[in-house]
Image (spheres, helix red, strand yellow):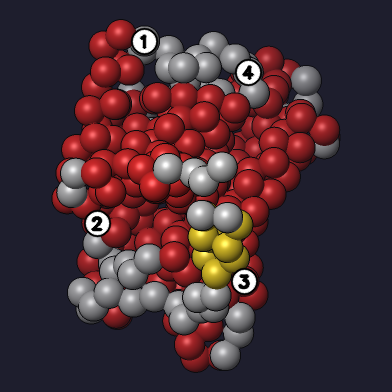
Amino acid sequence: MNTPGWFAALLQVIINGLLVGGVYALSAAGLNLVFGVLKVANIAHGDFMMLGAMTAYAVSLKLGLSPYAAMLVAAIVLAGIGALTQRFLVERVIHSPMFVSLLLLFAVSMILRNGALHVWGPTYVSLSHDSSVWTVGPLSFTKLRVAVFALGLGLTLALLWLLQKTAFGQSLRATAQHMDLAEACGINVRRVRMQAFALGTAIAAMSGALLVMLFSVNPSMGEIFVLKCFAIVVVGGLGSFSGAFAGAMIIGVAETLTSYYAATQLSDVTVFLLFLIVLVFRPSGVLGGKAT
């Protein structure tokens, strides 16, 4: 029995959205981690993603590394930048009202964005890749999209395992739940906060490096992607990693459906319309209130 053309097209679009959602889930997990441990809304997250993407691009181009090796280099570099940012900037305002850290991280965002524009200019770049395709019945899958989805999903699950099954993860969760009590139990809370911010920044770098394999990006990409990350964690439920994954899948599918059936220019409108609807009718998100 032949699959109707309209149904095959719909299924293809949904699967494409889910594949992109795997990268979105990873980036949102990094944002959730920093907020959970430090109680800081990291509005520079998108520009850390951008810097990870541009670093991976530059490293791959200059050193001839594979995109995946370049992603690891970008993660290490950005982890160091994140650690320094937290230690010498964010840590100084950690007990201040949230708007202070927002202003500080907004300044960091502007420095990163304009610095990247100075180095790379406004030109769009992407990493060359294999464009071969798998065909399953009426459906086609770009091998690269499948590989990037699998890597994004694997890294997200690895982060969840780290948080739930390791001593380091226990210290992160204890600090997230109650900083003073964690410190009374012998946890070096200041070090944990720095490690959490460094890890969140490394995750942002890896998600940015995966995005530059799929799309053309430039130093201004951070502005839209940080908003998408916030939309994802709100749709899924702030503080819930399973919710962030669900939110990423919903956002990815909503984007691709809008691009295919309406216009690409409206895909971001759909994302933020979903964001508003969830804020109004279910502020806790689709899986809000769950710990993982």
Residue placed under numbered mark 2 in the picture: 110
Above or below, 142 against 151 in this view is below
Residue placed under numbered mark 1 in the picture: 282
Mark 4–mark 3 CB contact (< 8 Å): no
x, y percentage for residue 106?
A: 27, 46
- Residue 291: numbered disc: 4
Q: Helix or strand or loop: what does disc 4 sit on?
A: loop
Q: Nearer the viewer, residue 163 or 124?
A: 124
Q: Helix or strand or loop: what does disc 3 sit on?
A: helix
Q: Nearer the viewer, residue 187 or 109?
A: 109
* Disc on the earlier residue, 2 or 3: 3
> In the shown orientation, is residue 186 left or right of residue 173?
right
Above or below, 135 against 7 in this view is below
Spatial CA distance of label 4 from label 2 is 33 Å
Q: Residue furthest top?
A: 281
x, y percentage for residue 85?
A: 46, 53
Mark 3–mark 1 CB contact (< 8 Å): no
